[in-house]
Image (cartoon, helix red, strand yellow):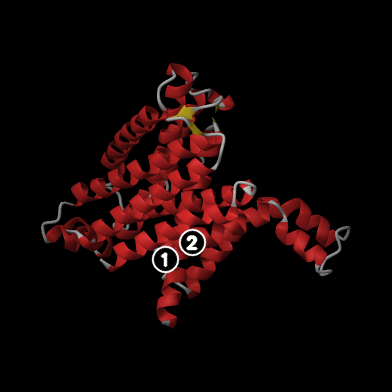
Amino acid sequence: MKQALIIALFAAFTALLPLFIGEENPYIIGIMISVLMMAALSSAWNIIGGFAGQFSFGHAAYFGAGAYTTLILIYSFELNPLIGAAAGMVVAALIALITGSIVFGLRGHYFALASIAVAEIIRLSVLNFEFTGGAQGILLANVTLWGLDLNSKTPFYYGMLLLLVVTLTVTEYLRKSKTGYYLQAIREDQDAASSLGINLALYKNRALLISALLTSVAGSLYALYIRFIDTSAVLDLRLSIEIILTAIIGGVGTLWGPVLGALLLVPLAEALRSNMIGDALVKLGLVSETSSVGIFLNDNLAHAHVLVYGIITVLCILYLPKGILGLFRRVK
């Protein structure tokens, strides 16, 4: 009940933010959409990775399934975006069931490597199919839904917020349910859980299926938002890694850890991509724009966000094994 109230307050507060920021600040709204999307993706991954302890590196496949299915059905058959999103969930569910039957017999790093292999097979397949646009991807013209102006970022902001709230609600329900307790038992000791009569394959597949469905919805929303997709945008291994790092840094296996991780990492990545940090150092007089250091920062900071993610992750593993949320609880 307490967490349900916190989720409701979070949703209400976040829903009001665009009213204060205004439509005249699309850049800020865009960053907030990215934060909400990464929080939703990381929270969805947290169901299988955090609570069940199965570190899947293949979640880009489910994200891409939602994105590609939605745009293909709109582009080729002019179907309603909601039908495309629903079809994307079906495709993601099929991929999850097939993936589970292949990889859940493996454990540890073997499982992680197998999940990467499955995701790469899907990425390469999409890259070579003509109906998916191949290497050129798919570009979508204007889309309408119930008269909403999808040229505006606001509908996607609230769409991502709704998805995040649903994901948090599902996560909290699972955490307190019998399934959640079984998943945590599997995470702690699979052999002990099996000896107690827990069907490992059933509950792992159930967690992966729920996680994949939520992830595919994020992919559908993202595809409608940017209206152009290719394999590097929605099926890249880097996306899966960023999703995992967000959960680890925020606090894996917790309800709010992925949200905290997204609030930290997404704005940081944007600051690096847009060279805000380098510009700030120049304005403060700490670095000369024409110096070798200034030139290096200008040329390389835009591509350094994954490296920064990695450094922060190593520091968290060494000094904050329970993530940022664990630090807050320890201080408290």
Instruction: Where is residue 27? Give x, y as percent.
Output: 63, 48
Q: For the residue marked with disc 2, what is the amino acid?
A: Gly
Instruction: Where is residue 94? Give x, y as percent.
Output: 30, 33
Local SS, label 1? loop
Q: CA distance from mark 1 to mark 2?
A: 8 Å
Q: Are marks 1 and 2 in contact (CB under 8 Å)?
A: yes
In the shown orientation, is residue 50 left or right of residue 277?
Answer: left
The residue labelled by disc 2 is: 261
- Is 180 in front, or is 11? 11
Which residue ends up furthest to the right in the rendered image?
290
Instruction: Where is residue 280? Give x, y as percent.
Output: 76, 63
In this picture, is 150 found above or below 43? above
Identify the residue at horizontal 31%, vertical 53% (top origin): 107
Identify the residue at horizontal 43%, vertical 50% (top origin): 161
The residue labelled by disc 1 is: 251
Residue 92, quarter of the rendered image: top left
One can see residue 110 in this view: no
In the shown orientation, is residue 65 left or right of residue 104?
Answer: right
In this picture, is 66 found above or below 36? above
Q: Identify the image quadrant of the C terminus.
A: bottom left
- Is 269 in front, or is 115? 269
Local SS, label 2? helix
Which residue ends up furthest to the left in the rendered image?
197
- Is 130 in front, or is 74? 74
Q: For the residue marked with disc 1, what is the amino acid?
A: Gly
Identify the residue at horizontal 41%, vertical 34% (top origin): 65
- Is 322 in front, or is 124? 322
In this picture, is 84 found above or below 236? above
Earlier in the chain: of badge 1 and badge 2, it is 1
Which residue ends up furthest to the bottom in the rendered image?
331
One can see residue 302 in this view: yes
Instruction: Where is residue 95? Give x, y as percent.
Output: 33, 35
